[in-house]
Amino acid sequence: MNINIQTVHFDADQKLLSFVQKKLDKLETFHDKITKVEVYMKIENMAHVIKDKIVEIKIFIPKQECFVKATSKTFQTSFDKAFNAITNQLVKKKEKIAA
């Protein structure tokens, strides 16, 4: 599983990157055929006022992909929301394959 974490318009500290990496390592428990994971962390900037933190997760499975986007006041909360949504998608896709 190839993992790519990108931050847009800011530099993430090691604590945030470790948090994200630790969560992403659990993805294989939900689906065993994941080939690539892309995570984008962005700061929504409206007229020079920093507003919300956006996290986008895209997961590539052979012949399929999953995508979620979550917004919150902190990156950890945004990532947790996105992670929960993407794991639900993975479980549904795996169940569909098994059926």
Image: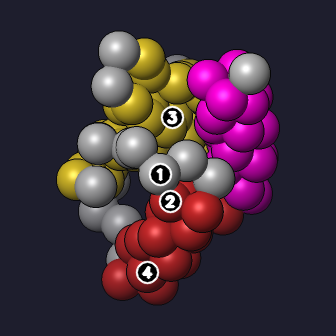
- The amino acid on which the numbered mark 3 sits, given as a three-letter code, is Glu
Foreground tag (1 vs 3): 1
Labels 2 and 1 touching (C-beta < 8 A): yes
Compute the Cα span from label 1 to label 3: 21 Å
Residue depicted at 60% across the width and 63% down the height: 29
Labels 2 and 3 touching (C-beta < 8 A): no
Q: Secondary structure at mark 3?
A: strand
Q: Is residue 10 above or below residue 41?
A: below
Foreground tag (2 vs 3): 2
Question: Which mark is first along the chain, 3 or 2?
Answer: 2
Mark 1 neighbour class, 10 Å CA radius: few under 14, some 14 to 19, many 20 or more: few
By secondary structure, the bulk of the magenta-drawn segment is best described as helix
Q: Which mark is residue 56?
A: 3
Q: Is residue 24 magenta?
A: no
Residue 42: percent from left, percent from top? 44, 40
Residue depicted at 57% across the width and 38% down the height: 54
Magenta residues span 77-98
Residue 32: percent from left, percent from top? 47, 51
